[in-house]
Image (cartoon, coloured by chain):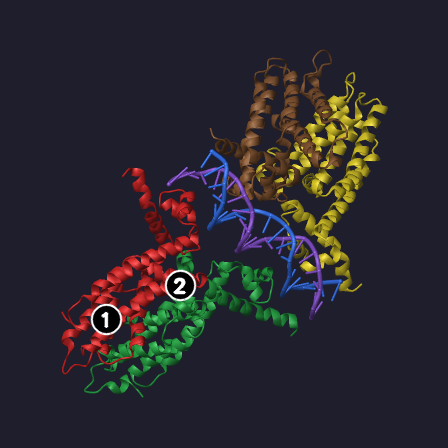
Chain colours: A red, B green, C yellow, D brown, E blue, F purple
Amino acid sequence: MPARQRRKAARPQELLDAALALFVEKGFAATRTEEVAERAGVSKGTLYLYYPSKEDLLKAVIAQNISREIAESMDRVLRFEGSSAELLRLMLREWWANAGEASCGGICRLMMSEAGNFPELASFYEAEVIQPARSLWRAVLERGMARGEFRPMPVESTIAALMAPMLFLVMQRHTATSCPQLGSPVDPAEVVERVAELMLDGLCRPAAAPSDADRRPA
Amino acid sequence: MPARQRRKAARPQELLDAALALFVEKGFAATRTEEVAERAGVSKGTLYLYYPSKEDLLKAVIAQNISREIAESMDRVLRFEGSSAELLRLMLREWWANAGEASCGGICRLMMSEAGNFPELASFYEAEVIQPARSLWRAVLERGMARGEFRPMPVESTIAALMAPMLFLVMQRHTATSCPQLGSPVDPAEVVERVAELMLDGLCRPAAAPSDADRRPA
Amino acid sequence: MPARQRRKAARPQELLDAALALFVEKGFAATRTEEVAERAGVSKGTLYLYYPSKEDLLKAVIAQNISREIAESMDRVLRFEGSSAELLRLMLREWWANAGEASCGGICRLMMSEAGNFPELASFYEAEVIQPARSLWRAVLERGMARGEFRPMPVESTIAALMAPMLFLVMQRHTATSCPQLGSPVDPAEVVERVAELMLDGLCRPAAAPSDADRRPA
Amino acid sequence: MPARQRRKAARPQELLDAALALFVEKGFAATRTEEVAERAGVSKGTLYLYYPSKEDLLKAVIAQNISREIAESMDRVLRFEGSSAELLRLMLREWWANAGEASCGGICRLMMSEAGNFPELASFYEAEVIQPARSLWRAVLERGMARGEFRPMPVESTIAALMAPMLFLVMQRHTATSCPQLGSPVDPAEVVERVAELMLDGLCRPAAAPSDADRRPA
DNA sequence: AATGAATGAGCATTCATTCAT
DNA sequence: AATGAATGAATGCTCATTCAT
């Protein structure tokens, strides 16, 4: 494969990466297409060869990063074999490690900001990301209840209660990149642990005696 | 007082209200100053009679809707006399009722989106909103520990764990206005209750036996 | 006459003075009507009570300062009784002292800059200022020739040769007010003397011998 | 070289020409950037591809038309070999032919009008135009004195006395383009000759007979 | 007569998008 | 495929002018 071909094949991805970074850093409106092209090492015109408009570029950015990171990283979780408390703790950590560390936080923030202007995108996001994520959490909670590890609970509101802090942390992390003042004063990974700890207390059966064993495993 | 004067006195507020609504609905960049003026029932020029630039308008919007709502609505909480668990539950509800129902969610979203482009604004927000809010939560947690109601805990990360879901819900609520797809499938008020329930389990001392009393007040 | 009346009577002049100062200092386009009003101690609206537009204000400014200063100050000159050389030297000094020291330089600059945009004004200026001034110089030159003091000469081009440096100095002086860099490095009054000296040499008959009398009057 | 490239290479000059013509004709403030672009045969946006702002455009206009014309056209003069009187007469004619016929008059008028609003520009002009021009005249006067052709004289004020009429004529010429009323009633070239004639009488040693020695004692 | 709040046409500037090369 | 010069619609902001009080 000649170099030219290799370059060409890589172009769309390079453009998406550049766009993701800039959209997340400066917001959609404040990012100029020329900047995106420049960062991807091509000219302005080339960008339009691959994506017909700035809005379409945003759609592609979201579409790609959505399916890839979230769904895939969560998949592993389902093959888990330990206690449901452990599983849930793992999920929270995974979420942070994958969604948080990578671009997903920026995507969330983008969606939060731009969804109103791109309803079509919002629907896509809802179907491709929100729904799958909710299903995943639902599976975990139901597994916990089925195995008698979790108390009976209102599932949907619990899902929301679990996702909310994680989504916020993940957004905050990416805001902090371009605006340190708004970052968390404590390490977000610690906050994730704290959320897990607090939530699990409420989720788990009081357990005969001091079930703290699985609540705070060394 | 002549009608002219009455109009003039009301103008700044009318403009702020219009700006708040539009900034929150469409984002800062996507809102045209002319729209703001139109919505306030004045002409483009009049807007500039009161606020020297679009950015200053944003600052004024934030300054007004922030310090007021948060600080004041939280104030009530401090005079509370019941158990710390009840106090915390009250705070969560208050936050939702005040910050959530009103404009604050939109402001949060705005800050999340625009902070990177307006560092000065971000600092202002951090000092005027984030810090006070954190102090308030800190006071509650310390009250709970001092009275032996809450277990010892890492305070700062707990604050973050409590604020995160609330901030997300509040942002989500306002996103949902312009984009129903991204709204919560369950009533956010219920999610607040669920967060309270789950968190309190983790915060409170196991309590002799059935501490369920304050966990699920009829 | 009540105070109110007195104020009212003085208004037009106060406005003209303020306008002259600002037009001359900043140029016509760069001067805002509000500034003029403010400087005159009235409100913006009041200005329009007296002058229907900014352009009309400029016309009034020019019209007033034109007739007043130039014509009148030159008038004195005609009653002069000494030698024509002395008369011409006096005229140059008068011009500088009156036109130069006062506002006339600014008016010249204004006309030079704005004439193209206000042809009507230019005609007025030509008729009211340029023509009379030229007539005055013509009278002096002809007096000098008639009395045998000046050599025969092409009158019109001599007039232009005399007026040109004076007009430039007078404009320069007013430019220097707002822009010291463009001022003359030597005292303009000295330059006027030097112009007089040089020109008179060319104007006067070689005069057998003692023409020095009127060239350097004690 | 492809046509596109040829166009691009020519653009800056085309834009400067258009800007010069319009600024000179209508003044800086009264000229719209769109007009400049239109006159250069491009769109509004293209102008900003080459010059980042209207003010920068003005700077470029001045920078280009100034140093070039003045310095270069005057250069020829220095290689002159005849009498100093002839040299001075030549300079005056050159000035008129070059500075006068070309754009310089308009630039002078522009500077006179706008200098106050662009101090930085004024300094540039002073250093690049005024100073060099003065140096040139100084060189001529000193040559004349050194060769015994000119009488001893106060050099600086003489320079000013020589430049003043020339600058005025040159400005007037360009005013006349857009406003014939203010033009000179006699051909400016004739006025230049007359200025030369008058001034030279004052500059040159009386030569032949009449003992001027006592007329201007050192 | 005087005010100053309100207006809106006008203009500099930006930037997504196009297209000749 | 790739470029980057060119475009022009869009928008923030200004300021001469109006008019209700």
Q: Is C78 on the left-hand or right-hand side of A4? A: right
Where in the figure is residue B81, as x and y percent of width and height?
33, 85
Front residue (pair B145, D61): D61
Disc 1: host chain: A
Q: Is residue A211 above or below residue D125?
A: below
- The residue singled out by tag 1 in the image is A196
Q: Is residue B155 visible?
A: no
Task: Give me the C-alpha separation between circle 2 and circle 1.
Answer: 29 Å
Furthest residue toward front = A1
Question: Can you say whether C172 is above or below E13 in the image?
Answer: above
Q: Earlier in the sequence, mark 2 or mark 1?
A: 2
> Which one is nearer the viewer's eye here, A4 or A96?
A4
| Residue located 60% across and 24% down the image | D137
Subunit of label 2: A
> Which corner quadrant of the image does residue A213 belong to?
bottom left
Which residue position holds label 2? A122
Kind of residue sitting beneath label 1: Ala
Q: Please state which amino acid type lies under the numbered disc 2.
A: Ala
Q: How many marks?
A: 2
Q: Secondary structure at mark 2?
A: helix
Disc 1 residue crowd, few under 14, some 14–19, many 20+, Cα 10 Å: many
Please give left or right for residue B90 compared with residue D15 in the image: left
Q: Is residue B71 left or right of residue D21?
A: left
In percent of width and height, residue D167 lies at 65, 31
Are there few (<14), some (14-19), or many (20+) residues within 10 Å of tag 2?
many
Circle 1 — which element? helix
Q: Check the picture and name the quadrant holding the C terminus of chain B.
A: bottom left
Report if the CB atoms under discs 2 and 1 are less than 8 Å apart. no
Q: Describe residue B175's horizontal placement relative to residue F16 as left or right.
A: left
Which label belongs to residue C196? none
Rendered image quadrant of residue A141: bottom left
